[in-house]
């Protein structure tokens, strides 16, 4: 019962920790342009892409050119997805003859997948053709993941380089990330998922004649699910092929696939901490950052698991405590094969990272259990975080932590040999402030307008939480939902902006910081330098993350989940 | 729209940077940084990698899957006399007393859609639904606490499993309708309990469709 969830947590953590070093070292080799064992096969493909696309792989870019290429590529790829959605009725691989997607929904979805968010205001089974899923959405699962990774690596290069104007070549970084990392792992992952029962076909939907009453036909959705599922997790995307996402038995058929999907999600974000340590020549710093992530990960799981294991005090006459043969706890919106433990663990993993996949319905969680995914996102998606975006978000907090440490001892702060000056702190603060500004502004507008309130599914404080969760999920580029909130024009359009701002307005300060750090000279460490590879630093970093997150969002949380938890235990319900 | 976002933010940063580092401004078109035509490269890169990732990759996986794992790749379908009766992985509706019932579904076991109720724990509609179901079951089985998975809707609406507790709870009803002993039904349930995977993953469970197919094989 209660112990089993912790056994599963411990085993997942142990496997993950064992992968950090090999994955991180491999990522570093790929992104430093070194030889890998896949070179004989992939090097010719890589050169072919450069030739076809007119990329001069030898020339590097400064931060403005890097940012320009990233934005240009994002605009073009977003337009492609928009076009595929709108025109899918005219295109092949649409066996169910689904109609073109409406303009507002196509805008929302294109923004959602371009920004690595994968928020879904639609039921995929009855909205998206197989071609749209594959070429319009799953492609972004690769692209947006690669964009996150290359920005993180550009920042790491900025930290490492001295007196350099350039931070790398965007197209080379993208090509190598996709070819050497994302595609090979996805191929292996997809085949494993098929073996476990995830479908992979282009059949039209199956007509089944159920056992009890063969006349009462059951139509079963099909599709190329496994290929999308693998990159959905690996790229911390989270956009489901089916409405129920990873709760659907076709996306996540067994507890083993559940474990595997969680590992895929964590693989790159955790590995990148080692890449950071290796590329900057300070492996201890990578470990200190990873340790801060693990502290927050463990704490979040502990609260969510405990909350979901509790019986609902308003229900009487049911077996709500765990037995050897029944998981008990809050099973509304959860699957029997996962029970409470695997559901809480998956929710923690998918919201600590910016994945946003769900294997249980967060809207039906207990108030406190549902607050944890929300808090994970509000901390800025830095507990592992999205592929790449987690690392660069975390490095922003590192800059802030070093700055605060510098203030305490009254010295100009240094970070791995770089003086942290006014411009750097401004960029870090810009990053840290844009995030709550977007979330709280959109939430405030929504609760003040009819269009914002009309989509709420649950009465009472929970309805407010649904809105807050949506805009947090969008700006954090997570994509999980309190899915009771229904789509209308306001949410489709506003969330589109919410997601784009949460992605690109935050990436640009990061690249500016990278460019500024790269051109600085290195200063040798002195006795006054605050070391960034000690447990003390881990504690300071964790503290900064919690304080920034808590101070910013505590008032909003107290109006939503905290109030709801208190009212639930006072026996109150809403109708 | 994206372009205006890009423009406004980059000007903002440019201004900040100019104020801070007037000396560091690189004059464009000069020096080492690369000068690509961004739009041309962006379009070509989108098209070529899109073809590889959006068409080539899923086709490759489909090809391999159909050779190596054809049963799984097609959705783990169960056939009876050449007709598909359902998927082993998906719940289907059972209401007769002669069968075990799956968990209640928010989508009516519609496998062309999926999802949960999304009702909050403090929503009166949820509490009334669950309490109503419990009271009904308790009227027929006085004093027996109802396993919670029996009265809660799953996340997918297509959960193929029930807990062993849930199956044992239903055993007397099925035994009576089929005119067999409860012990025989209990024995059948025990044969169909899947323990935790690898001994520690997930929760013990019983697949309802497989159990019901086994019931029919028993005869009566």
Image (tube, coloured by chain):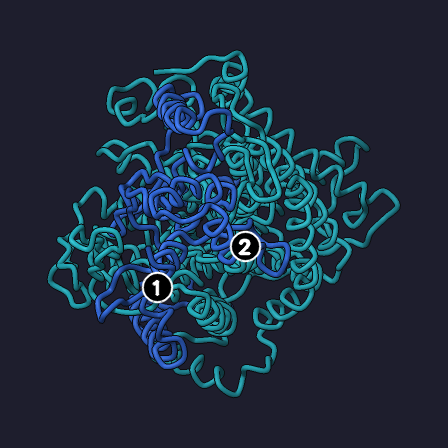
- Please identify the quarter of the rendering in which residue A325 is found: top right
CA neighbours of label 1 inside 10 A, class few (<14), some (14 to 19), many (20+): some
Return the x and y of residue B129 as percentages of the image width and height.
35, 25
Q: Which residue is mark 2?
A: A262
Residue A375 against residue A222 in the figure, above or below: above
Q: Which residue is mark 1?
A: B38
Residue A306 visible from this viewpoint: yes
- Direction left: furthest residue: A90
Return the x and y of residue A532 as percentages of the image width and height.
77, 47
- Residue at left 48%, top 31%? B146
- Residue at left 42%, top 23%? A462
Residue B71 against residue A115 in the figure, above or below: below
What secondary structure is found at the residue carrying circle 1? helix
Which chain hosts label 1? Answer: B
Residue A557 against residue A438 in the figure, above or below: above
Q: Nearer the viewer, residue A361 or B91?
A: B91
Q: How many marks?
A: 2
Residue A294 against residue A422 in the figure, above or below: below
- Residue at left 74%, top 37%? A540
Tell which chain the image draws in cyan: A
Q: Nearer the viewer, residue A53 or A4?
A: A4
- Residue at left 32%, top 46%? B98
Q: Nearer the viewer, residue A132 or A153?
A: A132
Return the x and y of residue A328 as percentages of the image width and height.
55, 36
Q: Please name the color used to draw chain B.
A: blue
Look at the image and tell me in which quarter the C terminus of chain A lies: top left
Do the residues at pointers 1 and 2 share their chain?
no
- Please identify the quarter of the rendering in which residue B96 is found: top left
Left or right: residue A385 compared with residue A175: right
């Amino acid at each position: 019962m209660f112990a089993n969830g912790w056994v599963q947590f411990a085993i997942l953590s142990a496997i993950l920790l064992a992968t950090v070093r090999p994955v991180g070292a491999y990522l570093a080799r790929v992104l430093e342009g070194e030889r890998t064992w896949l070179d004989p096969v992939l090097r010719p493909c890589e050169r072919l892409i450069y030739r076809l696309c007119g990329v001069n792989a030898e020339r590097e870019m400064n931060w403005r050119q890097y940012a320009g290429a990233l934005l240009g590529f994002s605009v073009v790829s977003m337009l492609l997805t928009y076009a595929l959605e709108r025109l899918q009725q005219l295109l092949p691989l649409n066996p169910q003859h689904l109609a073109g997607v409406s303009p507002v929904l196509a805008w929302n979805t294109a923004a959602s997948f371009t920004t690595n968010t994968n928020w879904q205001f639609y039921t995929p089974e009855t909205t998206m053709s197989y071609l749209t899923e594959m070429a319009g959405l799953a492609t972004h699962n690769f692209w947006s993941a690669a964009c996150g990774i290359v920005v993180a690596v550009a920042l790491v290069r900025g930290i490492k380089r001295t007196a350099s104007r350039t931070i790398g070549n965007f197209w080379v970084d993208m090509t190598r990330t996709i070819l050497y990392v994302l595609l090979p792992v996805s191929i292996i992952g997809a085949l494993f998922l098929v073996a476990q029962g995830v479908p992979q076909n282009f059949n039209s939907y199956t007509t089944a004649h159920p056992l009890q009453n063969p006349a009462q036909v059951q139509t079963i959705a099909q599709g190329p699910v496994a290929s999308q599922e693998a990159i959905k997790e690996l790229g911390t995307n989270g956009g489901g092929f089916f409405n129920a996402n990873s709760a659907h038995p076709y996306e996540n058929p067994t507890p083993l696939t559940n474990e595997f999907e969680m590992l895929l999600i964590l693989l790159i974000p955790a590995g990148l901490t080692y890449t950071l340590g290796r590329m900057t020549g300070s492996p201890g710093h990578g470990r200190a950052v990873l340790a801060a992530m693990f502290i927050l990960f463990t704490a979040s799981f502990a609260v969510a698991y405990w909350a979901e294991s509790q019986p609902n005090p308003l229900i009487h006459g049911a077996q709500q405590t765990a037995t050897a043969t029944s998981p008990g706890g809050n099973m509304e919106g959860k699957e029997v094969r996962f029970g409470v433990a695997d559901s809480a663990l998956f929710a923690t993993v998918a919201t600590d990272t910016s994945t946003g996949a769900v294997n249980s319905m967060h809207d039906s969680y207990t108030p406190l259990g549902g607050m944890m995914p929300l808090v994970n996102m509000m901390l800025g998606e830095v507990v592992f975080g999205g592929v790449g975006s987690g690392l660069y978000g975390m490095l922003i907090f590192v800059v802030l932590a070093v700055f605060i440490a510098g203030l305490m001892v009254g010295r100009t702060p240094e970070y791995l040999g770089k003086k942290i000056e006014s411009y750097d702190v401004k960029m870090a603060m810009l990053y840290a402030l844009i995030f709550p500004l977007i979330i709280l502004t959109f939430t405030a507008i929504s609760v003040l307008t009819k269009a914002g309130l009309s989509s709420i599914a649950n009465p009472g404080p929970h309805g407010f939480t649904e809105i807050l969760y949506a805009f947090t999920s969008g700006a954090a580029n997570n994509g999980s939902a309190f899915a009771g909130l229904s789509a209308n024009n306001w949410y489709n359009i506003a969330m589109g902006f919410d997601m784009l701002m949460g992605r690109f307005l935050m990436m640009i300060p990061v690249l500016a910081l990278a460019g500024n750090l790269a051109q600085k000279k290195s200063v040798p460490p002195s006795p006054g330098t605050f070391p960034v590879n000690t447990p003390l630093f881990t504690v300071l970093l964790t503290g900064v993350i919690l304080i920034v997150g808590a101070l910013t969002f505590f008032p909003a949380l107290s109006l939503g989940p905290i109030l709801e938890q208190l009212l639930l235990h006072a026996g109150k319900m809403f109708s | 729209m994206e372009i205006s976002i890009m423009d406004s933010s980059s000007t903002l940063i440019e201004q900040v940077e100019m104020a801070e580092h007037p000396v560091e401004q690189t004059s464009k078109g000069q020096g080492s940084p690369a000068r690509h035509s961004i739009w041309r490269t962006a379009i070509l890169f989108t098209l070529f990698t899109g073809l590889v990732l959006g068409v080539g990759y899923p086709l490759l996986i489909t090809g391999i899957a159909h050779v190596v794992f054809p049963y799984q790749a097609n959705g783990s379908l169960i056939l009876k006399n050449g007709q598909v009766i359902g998927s082993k992985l998906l719940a289907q509706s059972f209401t007769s007393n002669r069968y075990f019932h799956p968990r209640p579904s928010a989508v009516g076991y519609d496998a062309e859609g999926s999802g949960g109720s999304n009702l909050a724990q403090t929503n009166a509609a949820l509490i009334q639904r669950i309490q109503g179901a419990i009271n009904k079951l308790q009227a027929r089985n006085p004093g027996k606490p109802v396993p919670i998975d029996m009265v809660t809707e799953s996340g997918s609406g297509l959960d193929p499993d029930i807990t062993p507790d849930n199956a044992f709870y239903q055993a007397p009803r099925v035994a009576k309708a089929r005119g067999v002993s409860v012990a025989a039904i209990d024995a059948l349930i025990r044969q169909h309990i899947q323990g935790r995977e690898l001994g520690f993953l997930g929760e013990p469970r019983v697949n309802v469709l497989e159990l019901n197919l086994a019931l029919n094989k028993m005869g009566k």
